[in-house]
Amino acid sequence: MKTINANTKISKIINEDPAALEAIISISPKFNKLRNPLLRKLIASRTSIAMASVIGACKVNDFFEKLKPLGFEIDETVVVNKKARKSRPEFMENISRGDLVEMDVRALLDSGKDPFQLILEKLNSLKEKQVLKLINSFEPTPLIEILEKKGIQNYTETVDENLVFTFFYKTKHISFAEQSSAIDSELGWDQVIKKFENKTEYIDVRELEMPLPMLTIIDKLESLNVDTALFVYHKRIPVFLLPELKEKKFNFLIKEIDNSEVHLLIFKE
């Protein structure tokens, strides 16, 4: 019996019945990206029905109605996993209209471009007491998690199903350069290069459009031999990839060549 609930991962549903892919895509135009095998591989395994309903601006029940004809049984007794909603932070109470800097990234995302670097630059250009108001069509959870680790305060307001405001407040300059050291490794760049001499595979993702660089790297790592390192030519520090590497127990080193070229070395001890 194919039983699903609001917390069932999209990948599990598709694996149980490949026909579910088209059924899910028909729910919202925002799910068209699932047609891309690499993108589907990354997103579907991390996204539940409840999470997808937020992304697609639809209801959990919309999934149930589309999947029932395919033979899926619905368990409606399961409680949806939700994060506790944040209370309104102090920086939001003290903000004045003149201290609010708006940035609308919807057009960039719709064109398939990654706005992260522009967001980072905008944050670092803020003056004291200024707050960045990010305008989007969904809550940018990965971005929030990354910036929280950098000490950036945030608050999200959902205006409607297609309009979300996320406010960011920083107290210091943000940099990801410190992530150029290997996780749990005392080796430096030259030592690791030498260690994996003749045991290194190379890929170049500089000309790929977002999010293909990240997906290509993850796909390559899944077939990488344990004693082999992956050398990546990239045009920026792949900040969204780094948490994935940590989760998969990979070490990494990052070497910034210039403003448009970064070398990334990924390996396991």
Image (cartoon, rainbow, N blue to C red):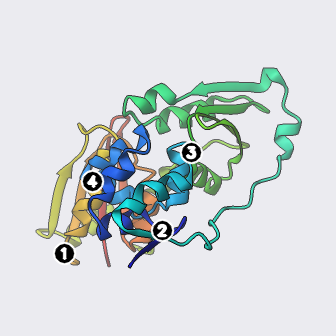
On the image, numbered disc 3 is attached to which residue? 140
- Of the two numbered discs 2 and 1 on the same chain, state the one appearing first in sequence: 2
- Of the two numbered discs 2 and 4 on the same chain, state the one appearing first in sequence: 2
Whether tag 4 and tag 1 are in contact, CB under 8 A, the answer is no
- Of the two numbered discs 4 and 1 on the same chain, state the one appearing first in sequence: 4
**Of helix, strand and loop, which one carries label 4?**
helix
Q: Is 22 positioned to the left or the right of 223 in the image?
A: right
- Of the two numbered discs 3 and 4 on the same chain, state the one appearing first in sequence: 4
**Of helix, strand and loop, which one carries label 1?**
loop
Residue 164: image location, x then y, percent = 64, 36
- Number of other residues with Cα within 10 Å of mark 1, as a class: few under 14, some 14 to 19, many 20 or more: some
Amino acid type indicated by mark 2:
Thr
Whether tag 2 and tag 1 are in contact, CB under 8 A, the answer is no
Q: Which mark is residue 225?
A: 1
Q: Nearer the viewer, mark 3 or mark 1?
A: 3
Residue 217: image location, x then y, percent = 27, 56
Q: Which mark is residue 8?
A: 2
What is the spatial separation of the Cα atoms under label 4 and label 1, in whole angstroms?
20 Å
- Of the two numbered discs 3 and 2 on the same chain, state the one appearing first in sequence: 2
Amino acid type indicated by mark 1:
Asn
Q: Residue at x 49, y 39 (%)?
A: 116
- Number of other residues with Cα within 10 Å of mark 4, as a class: few under 14, some 14 to 19, many 20 or more: some
Position of 133 relative to 78 (above/below):
above
Q: Nearer the viewer, mark 2 or mark 1?
A: 2
Amino acid type indicated by mark 4:
Leu
Amino acid type indicated by mark 3:
Pro
Q: Nearer the viewer, mark 2 or mark 4?
A: 2
Q: Is 121 positioned to the left or the right of 235 in the image?
A: right
